[in-house]
Image (cartoon, helix red, strand yellow):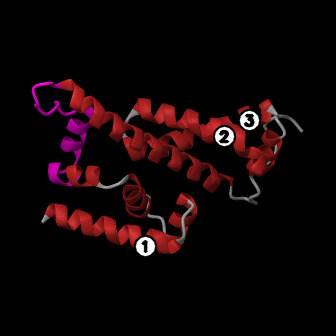
């Protein structure tokens, strides 16, 4: 069997054994669609590249623990989603710290280019309301609304119970309603 032959499940088993050629084949098969999905979620090419790299690094490290059968795409996407949520958290913390340091006269920092693009793409109030949601609530809305996933699919994707997906969706919608009223 050559490096790229076999299912993704087979490639993951080989990656778990340290097979670099299998890793390269898995990456070649999955990086493009994964990058598109990540980019749809964040709209930032640099962040997409960082999350993609972190995701495949996690795959290299965790492939030995993969026990799925035909679920490699969901497993990969759940890793990417968690990396994206972590990246959003890091950005939020960094934005607060940088915002405090940017202007020692107490003025608010100028909006980022990403904020300006979001404001032009969405209604400014909606963009602001979405930005104020926690990463966990935003991830549930993105999965159920943007990606059109069911509660069960979202639970598998985010690696949380279905009840958690439902309660986060309710909380997210309530917070958006309150912010937009």
Residues 38 and 32: in front is 38
Please tell me whether mark 1 sits on a helix, a strand or a loop: helix
Q: Quadrant of the N terminus?
A: top right
Calculate the distance from the C-alpha at mark 2 to the C-alpha at mark 1.
33 Å
Instruction: Choose between 22 and 89: the one closer to the eye.
Output: 89
Q: Quadrant of residue 142?
A: bottom left
Magenta stretch holds residue 64: no
Position of residue 28 relative to residue 64, above or below, is: above
**Lower position in the chain sequence, tag 1 or tag 3:** 3
Q: Is residue 115 left or right of residue 56?
A: left
Task: Say the numbered circle drawn on residue 23.
Answer: 3
Whole-percent x, y for residue 161 in the image: 54, 70
C-alpha distance separating marks 2 and 3: 10 Å
Q: CA distance from mark 1 to mark 3?
A: 35 Å
In the image: residue 152, left or right of residue 64:
left
Q: Pointer 1: what residue?
A: 166
Residue at image coords 63%, 37%: 56
Query: Which of the two discs, 1 and 3, sits closer to the camera?
Result: 1
Q: Earlier in the sequence, mark 2 or mark 3?
A: 3
Q: Is residue 24 above or below residue 180?
A: above
């Amino acid at each position: 069997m050559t490096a790229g032959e076999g299912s993704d499940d087979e490639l993951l088993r080989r990656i778990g054994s340290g097979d670099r050629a299998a890793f390269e084949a898995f990456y070649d098969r999955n990086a493009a669609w994964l990058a598109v999905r990540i980019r749809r979620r964040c709209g930032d090419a640099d962040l997409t590249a960082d999350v993609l790299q972190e995701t495949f690094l996690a795959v290299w490290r965790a492939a030995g623990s993969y026990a799925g059968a035909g679920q490699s795409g969901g497993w990969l996407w759940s890793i990417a989603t968690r990396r994206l949520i972590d990246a959003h958290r890091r950005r939020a913390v960094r934005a607060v710290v940088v915002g405090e340091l940017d202007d020692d006269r107490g003025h608010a920092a100028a909006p980022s280019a990403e904020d300006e693009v979001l404001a032009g793409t969405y209604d400014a109030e909606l963009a602001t309301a979405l930005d104020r949601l926690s990463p966990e609530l935003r991830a549930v809305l993105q999965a159920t609304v943007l990606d059109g996933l069911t509660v069960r699919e979202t639970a598998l994707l985010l690696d949380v119970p279905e009840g958690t997906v439902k309660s986060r969706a309710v909380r997210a919608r309530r917070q958006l309603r309150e912010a937009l009223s």
